[in-house]
Structures are given as C-alpha cells and as structure tokens.
Image (cartoon, rainbow, N blue to C red):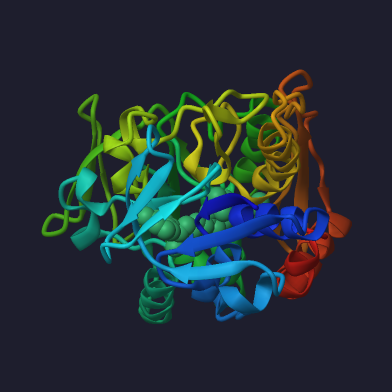
Amino acid sequence: MKRLLILGGGTAGTRVANAVAKRRPDVSVTVADSHGDHLYQPANLYIPFGIDFETRRDARALLRESVVLRVERASRIDAAARTVHFESGVKVEYDALVIATGSRTDHDAIPGLSEAGHHFHCEKSARALKDALALFEGGKVIVGASRLPYKCPPSPIEFTLLLDERLREQGVRTRTEIHYVYPLPRVMSLAPVADAVDGIFKDRGIKTATSFETESADPEKRTIRAADGRVLPFDLLVMVPPHCGAPFLAESGFAGPGNWVKADKETMRVADGIYALGDAADLPVPKSGAAAHYQSDVVVENVLAEIDGGAPAAKYDGRVQCFCETGKNQALKIEFTYATPPERPKTSYLAHHQKAILNRLYFSLIPHGWL
Ligand SMILES: Cc1cc2nc3c(=O)[nH]c(=O)nc-3n(C[C@H](O)[C@H](O)[C@H](O)COP(=O)(O)OP(=O)(O)OC[C@H]3O[C@@H](n4cnc5c(N)ncnc54)[C@H](O)[C@@H]3O)c2cc1C
C-alpha cells in the first residue's frame, strides 16, 4: 500500500486527507497534527464583538474513518529517506508528503507589540480584546496589519468596520478617532478592493495611514513607530502581528524567509513526492481557507498521479473567493484568479449572509469536502 503523510490537520490537510481516502482505499492516509484540534479561525474576528461561532472541533471527528490521525509535532523532513521525524522521537515513512502546517503569529518580530497591542488572530487574544473593548470609553484607536504576508488579508478591514459599527451603536464613536494603518501604499493589496474600501472608510470617517511599516510599539508612551519615522499615538491598538510558517520548516531546505514553503504556483509541487498548500505555501495569493480549498483539489490530483508513477498535471489557477465584512449586515464578495484580477466589489447583504452561513456550517461541511 502506498503511504500518504499529511502534516497539518487544518482546512487544507483535512480536505486533502478526506478526498484521497474517499477516492483511493488502496492508499493509506495519515494526518499528523501538533494539537489534534481543528480550528475555525475566521470565528476569531467576531469574538471581540461578543458573537460566538464554534471555534474548534476534535480533528478526528472531521476525518474519514480510514484516515489515521497522529497527534504529533513534526520536527524534521528527511526527503532523501522519505521520512518525517517528530518531536516525540517517532519517525514516519511516506511515499508522498503534503505540507499543510499553516501559519502562526510571530509576536517577537516587532519590539513592544505584544505588550502594547491586541489582536484577534487567535482565540485567546480575541477574548482578551473583547475584555479591552468592554472597558473602552472613547479615544484614539489604531487598527491595522504590521507586515505581509498574514492570513486573511481583509481581516483588519473587517475588524475596523465592525468596530466602527459597534462604537456607533454604543454612542462612543463621536468620542473616538479610528486610524487604519497598513504597510502597502493602499489599504489592501488588491487595488480594486482597496478602492472600494477607501470609499467606505471615507464615508465612515476612518482615517488611513498607508505605507506604514510598523517597526516598534511603545506600551508606555502608547505609540507605534513606522520604519520611515512616523509616530502615531493610540489609546487602543489592534494590530495583526507578523506571521511565519512552522519553525521546523526553516531547516527543511524547502522554505524561504518566514519559513514559507516554496511550491510551484500551479502544480503545488515542492520536490519529488512532496507538495505544499494553504497558508504554509509561499504563493502569490492571499493566505486563506478559500485559497486552500481550491489548492487542495489540485494537490489531490497531483499526489495521486505521482503515487501512480505519473507526473503532476493538474494546475491551480490562483482562484480565491472570499467575503469581507463591512458592517451593517453587509459584505464585499471578492473573486479572482492569477489571470483575472478582482472587479471593484460592491457591498451586499447577500455576501454578508453567505459568510454568515459558512460561519455556522463550517464544521458540518468540511468533513464532506463541501467547503
Ligand atoms: C481572524 C481570521 C479570519 C479569517 N477569515 C477568513 C475568511 O473569512 N475566509 C477565508 O478563506 N480564510 C479566513 N481566514 C484564514 C484561514 O483560517 C486560514 O487561511 C486557513 O485556516 C488555512 O488553512 P491551513 O490548513 O493552511 O492552515 P491551518 O488551518 O492553520 O492548519 C494548520 C495545521 O497545522 C498544524 N501544525 C502546525 N505545525 C505543525 C507541525 N510542526 N507538525 C504537525 N502539525 C502542525 C496546526 O496545528 C494546524 O492544525 C481567517 C483567519 C483568521 C485568523
């Protein structure tokens, strides 16, 4: 029996594992995940506002019965021996390997940031931010992202607009200045989306500081400093921290700066019998569950082709389809591929409700590959 080993049991790893297990009972599929919980990270955006969707489920419950789950943290890939070493000392051999270890926040990359600021990119921090928001009575708020890449590029925009809505409901908005800061020359990487968001920010009285590469934060003075010397004061700082790939990948020989795995942007192939997808892969598309969804279909085809002695022929076209909450029960729908940039999106109630359905049904849909 050929052996497929998948590192990471999140959105990407689960989709690949279940699809291969369903199609090919003759391939043994093992998922190794460092904690064994499958996290639904988009739910973290809503926690600070007191809106709770299910955030985690036992990874076992989402995998087909024939898939073996090992709760183990990978520590080294020996590509020559087709073996992965785990922190426990266990070694697992494979015929094909899929790297789907996601991304993580790297708090120490910006001095002072973890002491000075909040964020909502993990559940614990999102809950701490909820407590901070409950005490907030007005003042200067800075929301933004510190460095690229990070997962879900629209998420600081969504947070800004949901915060604006919440503060208006509470009657605190007139006493609050919201400043959105971003490292690029516009409020997000996709120009047509940035144009649409700019218009919304203007309508809602949200200031922006672009090309703002946050270099440090001062928790005493309550300021952030950009690489170009600009300094902004805050009473509340909500900053998406820098992200990086799993640390063990740094020594793998397959990763570049930030531990992102260098995969072919179409076939997702890294090396003989090795593929990467989702947040872990260094690809010119946003790190998102939506991208991982389309990439996993390609990885399944190509892994099976290689297991059968063929060559990878399936190609990822860079497709991403996602939603950006804009408050007031509306959202922007954003769709594009490598070849087709997004159109300038319009706010719509339908887009918001489509996202709301995903938030409620994620754990019902993911085991079947419907998401
Ligand atoms: C606030 C927020 C909002 C978001 N909103 C959206 C949205 O609206 N739409 C959207 O499409 N995406 C959204 N995302 C992004 C989405 O959650 C991620 O892009 C998606 O989860 C990536 O899937 P993945 O499988 O690559 O990584 P993950 O789902 O993070 O899974 C990676 C897995 O690898 C495991 N792992 C890590 N290191 C090791 C190791 N050494 N050994 C073994 N296992 C390991 C981890 O435990 C984890 O289970 C959002 C994210 C956040 C934080």
Extreme residue in the front direction: 1
Residue visible at 77% across and 59% down in the picture: 25
Residue visible at 20% across and 28% down in the picture: 229
Horizontal side, residue 42 vs residue 130: left or right? right
Where residue 294 sits: x, y (%)? 74, 42
Q: Quadrant of residue 316?
A: top right
Q: Is residue 278 above or below residue 352?
A: above
* Count of marks overlaid on the render: 0
Q: Quadrant of residue 365?
A: bottom right
Give 297 or 341, whichever is nearer the viewer.
Answer: 297
Where residue 34 sits: x, y (%)? 40, 65
Q: Quadrant of residue 148?
A: top left
Horizontal side, residue 59 vs residue 90: left or right? right
Horizontal side, residue 135 vs residue 7: left or right? left
Extreme residue in the top direction: 339
Extreme residue in the right direction: 350
Q: Is residue 158 visible?
A: no
State which quarter of the image contains the C terminus: bottom right
Q: Is residue 58 above or below residue 16?
A: below
Residue visible at 54% across and 52% down in the picture: 5
Q: Is residue 362 visible?
A: yes
Where residue 46 sits: x, y (%)? 58, 70
Residue visible at 23% across and 28% down in the picture: 227
Where residue 307 sits: x, y (%)? 67, 38
Q: Is residue 172 above or below residue 142?
A: below
Horizontal side, residue 157 vs residue 367: left or right? left
